[in-house]
Image: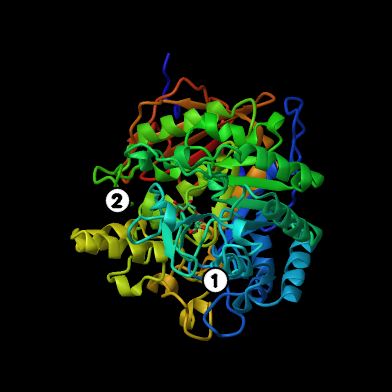
Amino acid sequence: MKKNIFSAVYYLVFIAALSSCNSSTTDNKVSSTEISDRKWWKEAIVYQIYPRSFKDSDGDGVGDLKGIISKLDYIKSLGITAVWLNPIYASPNTDNGYDISDYRNIQQAFGTMQDFDSLIKGMHDRGIKLVMDMVLNHSSSEHEWFKQSRSSRNNPYRNYYHWWPAEKGKPAPRFSFFDVNGDAWKYDSLTNAYYLHIFSDKQPDLNWENPKLREEIYSMMQYWLDKGVDGFRMDAFQYASKDTAFPKFPEGYTKEVVKYYTGPHLHEYIQEMATKVLNKKDILTVAEGAGSNPDDAMKFVYPEGKEFSMAYHFEGIDFGLVPGEFKVPDPKGLDLAKMKTLYTKWDKAFETKGWLSIYLANHDQPRMVTRWGNDAPEFREVSSKMLSTFIMTMRGTPYYYYGDELGMSNIKFNTIEEYNDIETINHYKQAKAEGKDLVKFITDQKIMGRDNGRTPFQWDASTNAGFTTGMPWLKINSNYTIVNAAAEDKDSNSCLNYFRKLTQLRKENLVLVYGKYTLLDENNADVYAYTRELDGKKLLILLNFKNTAATVNTDVDISKAKILLSNYSSPSVNSKLQPYEAVIYEF
Ligand code: ISL
């Protein structure tokens, strides 16, 4: 019989348990008989740092490694256990570091290799692991390999990239994500040939079919492992292998671009990389965007395949966009029932093997609270905390984006001139050329544009939010006088301190990492309710995704439940949840 889950009396006991929320032990006290395959990277809490925007130490307006070093105690205080750093290698920054011109050097604006060595030491001294971004589908057109490759058809580096001799006619169309015309082939008159670039024309695709290239890459990866890095985030790697005959794809193939761009030898190359480099150390490797459905994603991570540690799928993050359009949010708003079905499908597929990541934001996305919660002043904090609760209580390794711990929200630029991002700028040019409604484009980008998630971190209420003494490379959100780390550190009810409680809770409760996930009240359009269970321990998580009160119904008996954490100081005492309320119960 369905019960009103709030019919029981419960106890607010979490405060004592969480009183030392600034500590960040990596060990937890729970022993388990059910977990057969414990891994540090499954238990990790990953904090993503966009280095351009974290902290500038030298006043040039761009964040840098010394800046990050100066904030390591803050990072440690969050209770996170690993950092994923977006690319810091030498780059002309066509795509903010995703166009690498030298894989073995640090970008000048970010500092030096000595700074890098100090950074990794500083992290390791604090028990924090470092995961580097590996951008291996393409390099920068400024990379020495490409300069050589381009120079003549006979150059030894020619086959490091994909060239199509123009005397054979125009190659079969390939779609480019960033090209203004959506064309991935660029004609180069120097050698009368086209080269392939599935991102911008300054990001030519590397030819993974060439064993020499692969060996160079493996040795470069080994170089970073020898420096002590603890893992790699594999950027767009699902596109690395190509059918070099470049056959014609069917009409409309772009709807399934991942399928058509997944080359025939991809998994062979990943396994080769794993044997030659990755498996020699106990590292975290995460396959960005790999696989557009659970079955395909599993191929990258199932243990027998010996490929990557975990998948980072896009279905969750792309949910709620108008299909076939460039980043247009569904005007009908969030369909929570469908979203729950989606997350539940992925969890089920990875229940007994493989491993997933859980995230709601990253540098390619807007701010979590604007997209998935509500950034209106009355709801920003409470909905941020609710979303953080979701990330930290689902199965899978949480990836938490810098600034979300403060509840940072979208900056919502009014003009294209304020944008820096190649994706927004090129799609704007495309929309203009196609005579599309540019006002609507800017309106949609206020919600979805990538620069919303790239504005500088808000450290305090001083000039430029304490990010830089110079001119910030990207505008700072004017709400920094209220939303900033210094103010939130002092406020026990802040998003920041709530996040610290969540990290501690996750580290103390292996059930949140490994426990079975069960969706409850699945058709409820307002509330996401689920249990996590391990070794007789059971947690119930209730999340109201709406800005109005909502009711939940489940069969769960909570007569002896206690509240571990809630985002309201007086949590609801009946079946009604307050707007954006989040509660974690223990049985
Ligand atoms: O950003 C996206 C949509 O807005 C994705 O399609 C993205 O292009 C894709 O996930 C690959 O992203 C990665 O490689 C890109 C880079 O621009 C992204 O920042 C990076 O995360 C090219 O290197």
Q: Which mark is residue 464?
A: none
Image quadrant where residue 445 sits = bottom left
Query: What percent of the width, then of the height, locates residue 77?
Result: 66, 61
The residues tagged by marks 1 and 2 sit, at their Cα atoms, a distance apart of 27 Å
Q: Nearer the viewer, residue 151 or 65?
A: 151
Q: Nearer the viewer, residue 228 or 273?
A: 273
Image quadrant where residue 522 sits = top left
| Residue wearing tag 2 | 328
Image point 52% across, 37% down: which residue?
A: 291
| Residue wearing tag 1 | 52
Instruction: Find out whether the residues at labels 1 and 2 contact each other: C-beta distance under 8 Å.
Output: no
Q: Quadrant of the N terminus?
A: top left
Q: Which structural element holds mark 2?
A: loop
Seen from this angle, which residue lies furthest top? 1
Query: What percent of the width, then of the height, locates residue 481?
Result: 43, 74
Image point 39% across, 31% down: which residue?
A: 575
Q: Quadrant of the C terminus?
A: top right
Query: What percent of the width, then of the height, locates residue 576?
Result: 36, 35
